């Protein structure tokens, strides 16, 4: 049985905090992505999404700090974490989210792996559909944390609404032919120190080599390695850190040529990656595109 077949979870989405949601929408549109309408969380943040096949990008901004929930000892505050991330680091890649079908099972599994599990959290919000109508969608979140990675957030997400209320083909068609989150890239000189945590969180066995570990999930790979290894996927210019960070991500596309056309038409500078794909920087995050 392959490592992927034995994996427990797949990549659900990536959280990408920005200072200005309208400016970010313009940037992602110039990259050739279709963006959903803005949505507002009941706890003070807002977002738009880039829906792919089974996973998505969440571009997030602070909407109203006055309604951030008051912190409690065992809670993980999603809005405060991302607000603090922006203050400390500027725009970037703050959180990796895996999918879930059973939050209770997630909690038990995380505890069995020695992970620090926070209080369960559920919420609902309004989603605007392609025809302009609205639907209520809901999510169950299970947060875990690693104090040695203070700028990385981790949680699982179960959608508690009919899939057709969230996933929309009109939102999943992109001019750049994007299909999926192919690889999440984490980079730091201390990457070996975090392999056990990432095995427990992703639910996938690490495949280790001299400069990185790869976790083949049910939907996309997570890799953690040296900054030099990260640049082999993301291209030159990917940030270098001593402590492991979420460095960037790779999007699988149907046609790299379509990506090149979108970037040229959008006036977006790019570089070729060692694997023959393209990479562009947007709001503090390098994005690689490959076939």
Image (cartoon, rainbow, N blue to C red):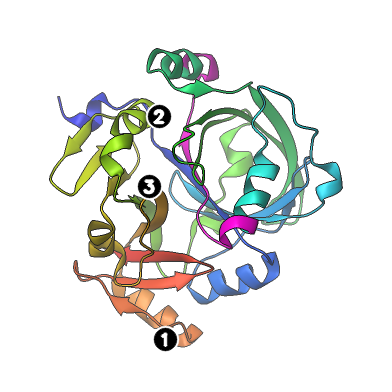
The quadrant where residue 135 appears = top right
Where in the figure is residue 221, as x and y percent of width and height?
A: 30, 44
Residue at (46% x, 45% y) in the render = 55
In the image, residue 265 above or below residue 185: below
Q: CA distance from mark 3 to mark 1?
A: 33 Å
Q: Which residue lies at the image location 52% right of the left edge and 59% below the top edge?
A: 92
Write down the region rendered in magenta.
87-105
Secondary structure of the residue carrying tag 3 is loop
Quadrant of the image occupied by residue 234 = bottom left
Look at the picture and state if 191 lies above or below 107: below
Whether residue 49 can be seen here: no
Q: Position of residue 200 (x, y in %)?
A: 36, 25
> Would you say 143 lies left or right of 174 here?
right
Please identify the quarter of the rendering in which residue 29 is found.
bottom right
Q: Residue at the location (31% across, 78% down)?
A: 271
Disc on res. 244: 3
Label 1, on which residue?
Answer: 264
Please tell me whether residue 51 belongs to the stretch shown in magenta: no
Compare residues 201 and 219 and report the one nearer the observer.
201
x then y, percent, for residue 110:
44, 19
């Amino acid at each position: 049985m392959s490592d992927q077949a034995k994996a427990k979870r797949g990549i659900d989405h990536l959280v990408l905090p920005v200072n200005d949601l309208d400016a970010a929408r313009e940037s992602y549109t110039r990259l050739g992505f279709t963006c959903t309408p803005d949505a507002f969380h009941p706890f003070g943040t807002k977002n738009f999404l880039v829906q792919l096949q089974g996973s998505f990008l969440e571009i997030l901004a602070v909407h109203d700090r006055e309604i951030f929930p008051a912190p409690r000892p065992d809670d993980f505050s999603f809005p405060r974490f991302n607000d603090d991330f922006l203050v400390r680091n500027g725009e970037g890649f703050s959180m990796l989210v895996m999918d879930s079908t059973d939050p209770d099972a997630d909690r038990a599994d995380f505890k069995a792996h020695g992970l620090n599990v926070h209080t369960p959290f559920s919420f609902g919000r309004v989603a605007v559909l392609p025809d302009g109508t609205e639907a209520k969608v809901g999510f169950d979140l299970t947060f875990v944390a690693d104090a040695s990675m203070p700028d990385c957030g981790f949680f699982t997400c179960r959608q508690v609404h009919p899939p057709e209320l969230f996933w929309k083909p009109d939102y999943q068609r992109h001019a750049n032919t994007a299909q999926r989150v192919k690889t999440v890239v984490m980079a730091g000189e201390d990457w070996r120190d975090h392999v056990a945590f990432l095995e427990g969180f992703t639910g996938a066995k690490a495949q280790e080599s001299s400069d990185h570990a790869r976790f083949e999930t049910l939907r996309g790979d997570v890799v953690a390695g040296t900054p030099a290894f990260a640049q082999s996927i993301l291209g030159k210019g990917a940030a270098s850190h001593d402590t492991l960070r979420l460095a960037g991500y790779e999007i699988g596309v149907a046609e790299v040529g379509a990506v090149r056309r979108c970037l040229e038409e959008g006036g977006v500078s790019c570089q070729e990656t060692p694997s023959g794909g393209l990479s562009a920087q947007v709001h503090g995050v390098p994005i690689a595109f490959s076939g």
